[in-house]
Structure formats: C-alpha cells, structure tokens
Image (spheres, rainbow, N blue to C red):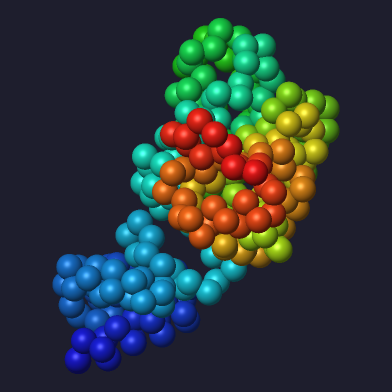
Amino acid sequence: MFEEERKQLIVNYVKSKSRVSVQELCDLLDVSISTVRRDLSDLEEQNLLKRTHGGAIDIQSVNFEPTYNEKIDQFTDEKIQIAKKAAEFIQDGDSLIIDAGTTTFCLADQLAKFSDLTVVTNSIPLIQKLATMSNINVVSTGGTLRKITNAFTGPLSEAVLDHIRVDKAFIGTNSFDIEAGLTTPNILVSSIKQKMISIANEVCVMMDHSKIGQISFSRFAKISDIDYFITGNEITQEQKKIFDINNIRLYIADQSDSSK
C-alpha cells in the first residue's frame, strides 16, 4: 500500500470511529507503531485529524470527549502557569469551587501557601490531592462517577451545590468560541458546570490555548457569565485578538497585565 493510500485509509477510519488507538491502526494497516505515529503527525499538520495520548480523533466531532488520562500530559507547562496566575486571585479565608479537569487540577499545588481555604469540588484526583493538605477544608459534591473524567456529576452532585455559596469558582472548558460560548461534549458535565457558576460570586475560566476557537456539543455558559479568563502565553496573536475585539477580560500567565 502506498503512503498516500494508507493515510487516506487512516482519515476515513478515524471519521468512522471518532476515536482510535495507535495499536488499532497498526493492526489494521499491518505497519509499525513508528509508521502510524509519523502518519498521524503528518495528518494533524494537514488539519485532517487531531492526535491524542495514544491515538487520534476526528477533528470534526463535537461529541468527542478525551479521557482524563488522555489530557493529563497535554500542555502541562502551560497548565501549571495558568494555575499560578489563577492563585493570584485567591485570598486566605476564601471559599472556592474548583471544577474537574486537568488544568484546574494544577491549581491544587498552588493552594499549599494559604493557611485557611475551603474547597468544594467534584474531581476525584483533586479530592485525593487536597486530602493531604491540613490547610484545606475539602467538600466533595458526591454523585455519580463519570470514569472517563474521574469526576462526579448528576442530580445528587447538583443537589449538594444547591446548599452552597462560594467566593470564587475556577472552571475548565473543552471549548471556547465567541459566538457559541463555553461548551463541553456531555450534557451532565454541562449541567454541573452551570450550577458551579451560579453559586459563585466570581467566576474564572482556566483554559489552555488549544480550547480557543473550538465548539463542543453542549453550552454551559455565555461569555458574559464569566468574570475573567486565564490562558497561557502560548496563545497566538490571532487568538488574543478575539478577546481584545470583544472586550473580554483576559489574563495571560507569565504576564502581569490583562488584556481587555
């Protein structure tokens, strides 16, 4: 099979399956792992698919939701910088709600410097991390566990939040688009994010630059529902213009000024 034929087969297969693994493609094409990875890299550069940890996804799928493990190693340095910037908005004595996600998870390490905080979260990894910190009063939403994201969702989670008000919410997102707003692939996840936003006096969205210009299935917030956004300095000038033109309050990690 010629290289172009193989690549076209990969694209067609990914579209039909939405998500595939490298090993699955190796078995399908009878080629080495290095060949598949090279092909996936070339196809991603051509904007024909999106690589993930251990595989690839259809770039057009608004329903696609990467697993927690697929996201944990992506843009790690940027996520840490975003978390450092987010911590600048926290004061001792604050009550916080921290959304489940790999970017918001990075905020945990920044909380050790505070002496007294209350953190409400639906994230299993975050609960486990904060449980080791004596300065943090941890409140779990409980509810139905979504294994794909290691997070609680559903009516029971939301019922707990009905009895809570917090100073600040730190929310993650799968996608940001100026017209579509903030979106996520799953309706249950969208619903609990809405609830988190509704109980907070101040709302911050933490997102790496790859989320900008993307749209997923279910909207959980309009741009106007958010007080400010934080992203990393990997943001492009074109992406930055989206915020500038629309007068959206943006903070860029590693930079002291905000863009408005």
Residue 187 in the image: x percent, y percent?
A: 70, 57
Q: Residue furthest right?
A: 163
Residue 198 vs residue 123: left or right?
right
Q: Is residue 168 above or below residue 208?
A: above
Q: Is residue 152 left or right of residue 128?
A: right
- Residue 162, given in percent of the width and then of the height, sits at 83, 33
Question: Where 103 sits versus 182, above or below?
Answer: above
Decide which of 258, 60 is in the foreground and name it. Answer: 258
Q: Which residue is located at x 69 percent, y 28 percent?
A: 168
Res 65 seen here: no
**Residue at 72% from the left image edge and 42% from the top image edge:** 226
Residue at (53% x, 74% y) in the render: 60
Decide if residue 172 is on the left or right side of residue 102: right
Q: Quadrant of the N terminus?
A: bottom left
Tell me which residue sits at (51%, 19%) in the image.
111
Q: Is residue 88 above or below residue 29?
A: above
Quadrant position of the C terminus in the picture: top right
Residue 121 location (% of width, % of height): 63, 31
How many numbered discs, if any? 0
Please tell me in which quadrant of the rendered image residue 96 appears.
top right
Q: Is residue 46 visible?
A: yes
Q: Nearer the viewer, residue 79 or 135?
A: 79
Question: What percent of the width, then of the height, locates residue 102?
Answer: 48, 41
Nearer to me, 158 or 203: 203
**Left or right, 240 with reference to 260:** left
